[in-house]
Amino acid sequence: MSATLKRKIKRQWQFYLIILLPVLYLVIFHYIPLTGLQLAFKRYSLSKGIWGSEWVGFRYFRQFFASPSCFRVIWNTLSLSAYSIIAGFPFPIILAIMINEQRNRRLKGFSQMVTYAPYFISTVVMVGILIQVLDPRLGIVNRVIMKLGGDSTDFLGSANMFKSLYVWSGVWQFTGYSSIIYVAALSGVSPEMHEACKIDGGNTLHKIWYIDIPSIRPTIIILLLMSMGHMMSIGFEKVFLMQNPVNLSKSEIIATYVYKTGLVNANFGLSTAIGFFNSIVNLILIYSFNKIAQKAGETSLW
């Protein structure tokens, strides 16, 4: 280490101390595990370990693409993710604008608290609530349907309803929390611009359309790009908990397939290859959408 760098670290030791823990976290939990990616190209042997196992080239990738489940799990993952983004992305923006327009401070705080609360429900409890509410015999939804003269429906037992149940329960759970960033962005909009709009005869809708939304457009673009970059990385836990043999044709996604292949069937090479493919597609997607944003002249991630 050079003397200049030592003096710099000594002079700014507080800064380096603050970033030390996040950097350690990234190195330990994100970069060191990357060495395990070589399992995608090796026949793993417990006795030889990761580094000593035999190389097999692209065998596991070919095996994945040749399997009957390949395109089904890719399609399920992409369609579920796209559905989640299309249905869920506008609601936090709308909620943030509604909260920002609220002038009564107590009502504003109450609205935020009520809408944020579902985020703090754990995924396990959330799915438990969903199962109880939609139960074919005792669930409140089916009771209401039967009271109105309809027939009881097994919602979670219907493959075609799985995606809607997953997406709209997620919208209910995460809309309040996701709106926090937009509320913060809206709080930075200059009040003078609102006053100027009012003087020019603009109403509330004009103010939202011509001032608020353009002001938070960079934030919207960045968060949309980040969502696009995770299109192939839908959370494993909720899908797995909602999954059953009846809806498996629509609920089997890459994350659950990797779990079953790697941990249940102990095929570590194949599961690593599928996960590697998933990460590559995510990288291509986020790079492509970032390029599109750059071409459109909007904000981009880099």
Image (spheres, rainbow, N blue to C red):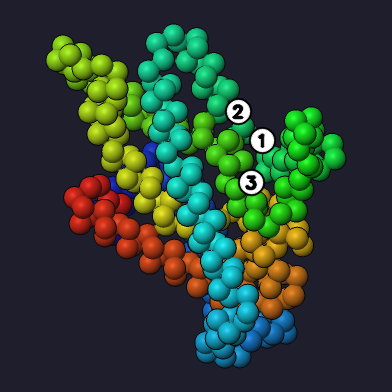
Would you say residue 274 is visible in this rendering?
no
Residue 143 vs residue 139, the one in the foreground: 143
Of tags 1 and 3, which is closer to the observer?
A: 3
Depicted 177 relative to depicted 239: above or below: above
**Circle 2 is placed at which residue position?**
117
Q: Of label 1 and label 3, which has the lower sequence position? A: 1
Give the distance between the C-alpha atoms of the residues marked 1 and 3, in whole angstroms.
17 Å
Is residue 279 shown left or right of residue 120?
A: left
* Quadrant where the image shows the N terminus: bottom left
* Tag shown at residue 165: 3
* Quadrant where the image shows the C terminus: bottom left
At a point 41% along the width and 15% down the height, the residue shown is: 102
Label 2: how many Cα within 10 Å (few below 14, some 14–19, many 20+): few
Is residue 13 shown left or right of residue 299?
A: right
In the image, residue 185 lies at what x, y percent?
A: 34, 30
Give, as a three-letter code, the residue at label 2.
Answer: Ala
Tell me the element at label 1.
Answer: loop
Give the distance between the C-alpha atoms of the residues marked 1 and 2, in whole angstroms.
7 Å
Tell me the element at label 3.
Answer: helix
